[in-house]
Image (cartoon, rainbow, N blue to C red):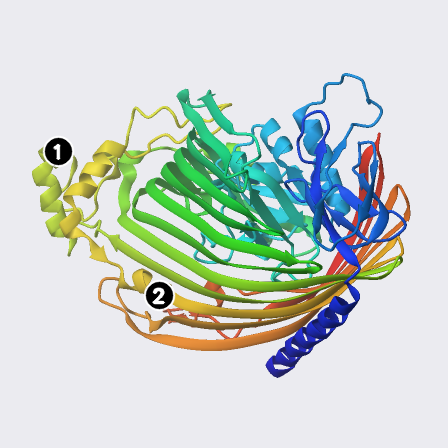
Amino acid sequence: MEIMGYKLYKLGFLFFVIVMNFNLLTAQNKGVLEGKVVDAATNEPLIGAAIIIEGTNTGAVADLNGVYRLTNVPFGDAIITAKYLGYESLSKHVNLTTSDKQDLDFELNLIGILNEEIVITAQAEGQISAINKQLSSNTIENVISAKKIQEVPDANAAESLGRLPGVSILRNGGEGSKIVIRGLAPKFNKVQVEGVKMASTDSDDRSTDLSMISPYMLEAIEVSKAAMADKEADVLGGSVNFVLREAPKETKFDVLLQGGYNKLFNNYKNYKLVIGGSKRFFNDKLGIFAQVDLERRNRSSYEMKATYNNVLLSNPGPLDTIDVSLTNLYIQQISRDIKRGGGALVLDYKLKNGSVKLSSFGSLINKNIVNRYEDMRPTYLQQYYGLNNSVQDIKVMTNSLSINKSYGPLKISGGLSYSYSDNYSPDNVIFSGIEANAFETPLDLEAGPSYVASKAKYNIDNAIVSEISKDSFYTYESEFALNLNLEYEHSFSKNLNMKLKTGYKHKILNKFYDREYNKIPVSWAGHGAAFREKILETYPWMLDYTSPTSSNLPYSLFADDNYTDGVFPGGDYQVKYAPQIDLTNEILNISEDYYFKDYILSNKDDYEGTETYDAAYIMGTFNIGKKLTFIPGMRYENNTTEYTANRGNSSFMLWNEGYAFSDTTVKQTHNYLLPMIHLKYKPLSWLDIRLAYTHTLARPDFSDIIPKWNIEDFAVEWNNPYLKPSLSHNYDVYLSIFQNKMGLLTLGVFTKRYII
């Protein structure tokens, strides 16, 4: 397969060179038009405007700055028309006598309001822009424009994405964090900034936390639901690309200040500050855009989770003889103090027939989370009281340098990029106690959660401390990439236009994960004796509440009898005797010398590794007549993974007595040829039909392919490091109906057939 892919790339590149040289000989009587399409009233760029040469099928599409480039324009007289949904079309006469680039700008008026005064909202402008971008795209795509993003005050980019069809969001503490496209989990979707993949913030899978991205630094959000050969193929669900803002012609300075109040927890410490500006220099050739975001949010919440179990009665019969009982009721009051800082810097320089762009984006989130909880286990008549206090620092960064340059009908583009993530959570504190015989009996486990909660005794004098521990995690990922693309356009006749594109991409990904778990022996016996002496020496009043003959540590010494924030709205649930957080922290501070490392948990899941990726593709875009566009393509991908993890035996081994393991490295290579076919048909001026067949893949989670195993007393954890990527055959049919005064109605169906 690897040899076949290499031959395909060589053959495609050779074909490209032959076609380019042949057409260079026939392109002597053709020129280039370049210009900008803007709103006549506001001078705002009209993204996705279509520019065509009348009487031919040759055309171009305006980019995010409203700029278009039209090649293969025949010498002599021609009529050039600019079209944009919601606006009056405008045609201009040109007479080309030279192959050098000539400028031709268009100023379009909103339809039906020529010479009239009208007020249109920014959100409506954004919607029009998004519709035009969607219609002009060759793939199945949804777009959110900058105006629409900024009109609605979304907390982050994930919230903005949730407004698109086929996209839903996963929330953490009420805030959007990850996206689901077409029902597929976040790990099956690719997230990019300026075409650069964001590094994963998770140690297990390849998903990315989108709460890191501020919507105010974005020019557009592009969601592609059908892959094309010139894009990476690991997108079972879809791909999201965040386009950063560039400096417009006019100098701008923006300030946004917001405040907020959380009534549920009476918190006023919510704010958001955005400061940004842009300016162009050297006759508008150099543009600089910079922005800084600072934010603080209280995302505290009350949460309840219930677990049920199906238990067959002694005489199994019909379904109505199955007893459904509540086995676990988890009640939490979670305080979340989230601080976020980020920024973007974009420099672009206009070359003759091209541009250079340097983009940098970075974000840091600090999460301070205090989770007070009660874990009720009515089947065992047990209740746990607990406190988890954690601090998490997440950093993400992407940097890219891109260049594109046109030489007549030939366009060369490429660049370098670097992305990085760092997820560090030091000293997560865990403090819990357990109460036996914690419920009034008899107890009806079919009665529901509120009934079970009402039967809790809350007899903390009968509770003992069950765990005191500290846990830390560190995850790191970096990726370096380079790419080169060649694109050539030629018109064979008025009814046949072709774009041929080929390219190559190389990436190196590094991944690292480490965990350290330490705990204090909570029993007064054995190792806990020294801990007992230290506690009683520091807090002599505890002597009156401890028994010299008991090996247990009473939980009542640490319970906060005055804690009132744990009562849920409605009063059915409460977190009543949470640990005193100040006393708990004091205990942890004086106990540093008494922690023992849990060698099993601290080593069995650690890993590090490298992935090397090479890809090549060839793709053609054929405009046949004025109604049909056919886009066949083939992509070759080669991915080599090399991961090191631990294999050990923890059976009959105490947690503080070491861990018998050895590190193991496994190297695997997978390569695939992936065909992609798109068809775009416009039988009527108001009807757009799209068909697509794509062949995509999903690479296994990091935690699944590391060569790890662990043999326990009565269980075995065993990874398969030889897992192959999952392949999918995808079929899409989309139908769009649109008119200038109506907007856009889109109907679509899709199916995916997986090969695992």
**What residue lies at 84% left-to-right and 29% top-to-bottom?**
741
The residue that label 1 is drawn on is 544
- Pinpoint residue 541: horizontal percent, then vertical percent: 11, 32
Quadrant for the N terminus in the image: bottom right
Specify whether 729 is left or right of 350: right
- Amino acid type indicated by mark 1: Asp
Q: Nearer the viewer, mark 2 or mark 1?
A: 2
- Amino acid type indicated by mark 2: Lys
The residue that label 2 is drawn on is 604
- Pinpoint residue 43: horizontal percent, then vertical percent: 67, 29
Please say if 134 is above or below 40: below
- Neighbours of disc 2 within 10 Å: few (<14), some (14-19), many (20+): many
Specify whether 307 is left or right of 81: left
Q: Secondary structure at mark 1?
A: helix
- Pinpoint residue 346: horizontal percent, then vertical percent: 49, 43
Given residues 302 and 449, the one toward you in this image is 302
- Pinpoint residue 357: horizontal percent, then vertical percent: 52, 49
- Neighbours of disc 1 within 10 Å: few (<14), some (14-19), many (20+): few
Specify whether 202 is left or right of 42: left
Q: CA distance from mark 2 to mark 1?
A: 42 Å
